[in-house]
Image (cartoon, helix red, strand yellow):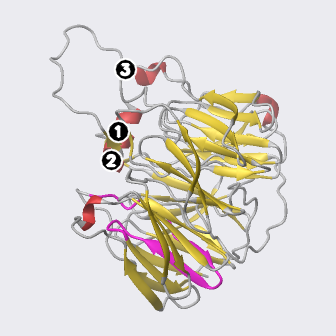
Amino acid sequence: MRWAAALAAAGLLVGCEGSLPPKIQGTRVSVMSLERTLEPDPGMRELRVRLPRPHRNPDWPQAGGYPNHALHHLEAEGPLALLWRADAGAGSSSERRLLSGPVVAEGRLFTLDAEAMVTAFDAGNGARLWRRSLVPAGERADAGYGGGLAVEDGRLYVATGFGDVWAMDAGNGAVHYRRSIGIPFRAAPTVSGDRLFVISYDNQLHALAAADGRTLWTHNGIAEDAGLLASSAAAADAGIVVAPYSSGELVAIRVENGRVAWADSLVARGRFSPVETLAAIAGRPVIDRGRVYAVSHGGQLVAIDLRSGSQVWDQPIAAIRTPWVAGDYLYLVTLDSEVVCLSRQDGRVRWVQPLVRWVDDRRKVDRVIWTGPLLASDRLIVASSQGVALSISPYTGEVLGQIQLPDGVSIPPIVADGMMYVLTDDARVFAYK
C-alpha cells in the first residue's frame, strides 16, 4: 500500500510493535485499484495560473519561514550554481533521523543535527562561526534526535529531542536559559511576538515566555501510541495559534489565554490498514488571508476559516508535507508522489504532475520519497530521497530541469536573500546562488 511503502522507505513510522498476523486465505484484490485517482478539474483546464511577482526574503528565521508559514513567491533567480558546502554534524542512520531544517537570520545559517548539535555558519560563504552540543549530561547523543530552531531579535531558540528548550545568543552561542519540559520535542518552536509555541511528543502544545522560558499555558491533544517521526510546527497569526497533532486534530487556540477557539479532525474515512489510519498532521499548517490550510497523512486536505473554524473546502488528498500557498493557488507534494496545483478558493485541481515513485519501477521496490515544494522565481523545487532536485513550472506542472545532489533529501530546501540552501540526509549543507 502507498502509505506503508512511503513510511518504510522514509523510516518515519514509530510505535507499532508485534509480529505479523498469519496469512489469510482467499482471493486478493489490490486496494490500489480502489484508490481515488487525482485528476485536474475539467472546469480548471483552460484557466491560466497567475502568481504574484517574486519577492526577496532576507531571512528564513523559523520552520516554515515565518510564524504563519505563508511565504508566497520567493526570489532565487536561476540557473542556480553551487556556491559552498559545509558539514552540519550527524545525519540520519538506522538509529536516528535528521528531522530539523535549517534557518537563516541576519546573515547566519543555523542547523540542528541528529545528535542535538547546533552549528552556526556564515550564510554567505559557509564558514563555521560556532558550534554547541545540547546533549544533557549522562545522555546518549543519538537518543535525542528531533526538535528544531527559530531565531528572533538576536536570540536562537532550540527545542530538542531531550525535552529541553534553549535560548541562546545567535551571534556566539552563549546560553540565556535552558528550560527542561521533560518530554521529547520532535518539532521546531514557533516564535510569535513574545511567546514560543512548541509541541511535545505526547501531543501537548506548550506556550512559553520567550524572555525566560516560563510556561504560560498548555493545551493537551489526544495522545497517540503510534505516530510518524515527522516535524510539524504550530502556525500563529492574528492572535491565534493553530496546533497540528499526530492524532489528526487541528486545534486553534487563543494566544493570550490558551482557550480553544475551534477544533477540527483531519481523519479520513475508508482506510484499510493500521498504517493508513494514521491521521497525523506531519506538514505544517499555513495561515494565509484569514484561512488555515492543512493536510493529514490520513487523507484530508482542508481550508478552514481562521475565525469561525468552519471548513471552506476539503479534498481527499494525503500528504506529510507542508502546503505552499501563493496567489490564488496551493501547491502540495502528495503521498502518491505527485505535485498538485489546486485553487486556494475552492480546492479544485488545476494540474497534477506525477513524480518517480520507485527506484525499480518494474519490481515496485525502494520507494522514492519526495519533499517540498518551494516556490522561487517561477519554479517549484522538490527534492527526493534519491538525491534528485526537480524544477517544475508552477503554471503548467511541466518539469523544467533537474540537478543531482550528493545525497538523499528528506527536509525541504529553503531560500533566503536569493540563495537556496539544501540540507541532505547525511547532514551536509549545500548553498546555491
| Closer-to-camera residue (13/372) | 13
- Going by the numbered disc 1, the residue's amino acid type is Ala
Judge depth for marks 1 and 3 and give the one in front.
1
Q: Residue at x 40, y 20 (%)?
A: 31
| Closer-to-camera residue (60/326) | 60
Q: Residue at x 38, y 62 (%)?
A: 98
Q: Is residue 32 above or below residue 420?
A: above
Disc 2 designates what residue?
9
Residue 388 in the image: state x and y as whole percent: 45, 63
| Closer-to-camera residue (50/265) | 265
- Going by the numbered disc 2, the residue's amino acid type is Ala
Secondary structure of the residue carrying numbered label 1: helix
Mark seen at residue 5: 1
Q: Principal SS element in the magenta part? A: loop
Q: Residue at x 40, y 33 (%)?
A: 224
Choose top left, top right, bottom left or bottom right for residue 215. bottom right
Task: Please tell me how crowded label 2 is: few (under 14), some (14-19), or many (20+) other residues with Cα within 10 Å.
Answer: some
Judge depth for marks 3 and 2 and give the one in front.
2
